[in-house]
Amino acid sequence: MAGAVLAVVAGAGAGVKALAERAPLAAASEPDAGPWRQDGPLVHGCTGPGCDGLAPGALGCDRADAVVTLAEHRTEEGRRVQVRYGRDCRALWARASGLRAGDRFALRLPGAPARTAGPVGEEEAAGYLATLMTGVSGPDAAAGATACLLPVHGPEECAPVR
């Protein structure tokens, strides 16, 4: 009996890992969309450093009731870039909207690899997009994080966490 339970748990873990590995580089990040949604408590597929390089939407880390926007910048043209923190997943990512074809955006955190998404295509520009995540120990570890819009034309514009 114990062996059967362990086999089921191991199989579920392998399924989560396989799903995460197939996540795209710039994942759609619409609230309450994705395979981890349910009515009730958040079900997520990673925590802290285990979220490094994974898509927030694919793993349930972007659920509206479990996310805090730590910094935001809006351009004069209506583009928006944010630093987002998933409380239950303990991870950061950049989210952007109002983009133009060819734009890119990035999350930068001292001591961690930059997470860049884009260039954005025409069809992707209409919605919210997110970079892959960087796991952190908690919201205080986000100090110094910056989400930057890298427009195809014009200067870089950033939203720093203070």
Image (spheres, helix red, strand yellow):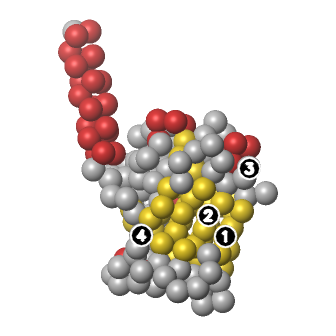
The image's mark for residue 158 is: 1
* Disc 3 crowd, CA 10 A, few/some/many (<14, 14-19, 20+): few
Sequence order check, earlier mark of 4 and 2: 4
Q: Is the residue 78 above or below the residue 114 in the image?
A: below
Which quarter of the figure has residue 81? bottom right
- Disc 4 marks a residue whose amino acid type is Gly
Which residue in the protein does label 4 denote? 118
As measured in the structure, the alpha-carbon distance from the residue carrying label 4 to the one carrying label 1 is 16 Å
Under tag 3, what secondary structure? loop
Which residue in the protein does label 3 denote? 143
Residue at 66% across, 70% down: 158
In the foreground, 156 or 5: 156
Tell me whether circle 4 and circle 2 mark residues in contact (CB < 8 Å): no
Q: Picture coordinates of residue 126 (x, y %)?
A: 42, 82
Which quarter of the figure has residue 112? top right
- Disc 2 marks a residue whose amino acid type is Ala
Which residue in the protein does label 2 denote? 147
- Disc 1 marks a residue whose amino acid type is Cys
Tell me whether circle 1 and circle 2 mark residues in contact (CB < 8 Å): yes
Q: Is residue 90 visible?
A: no
Q: Picture coordinates of residue 102 (x, y %)?
A: 42, 80
Q: Residue furthest right?
A: 162
Q: Is the residue 129 above or below the residue 15 in the image?
A: below
Sequence order check, earlier mark of 4 and 1: 4
Q: Is the residue 75 above or below the residue 27 in the image?
A: below
Q: Residue furthest bottom?
A: 77
From the viewer's perspective, is 89 left or right of 55?
right
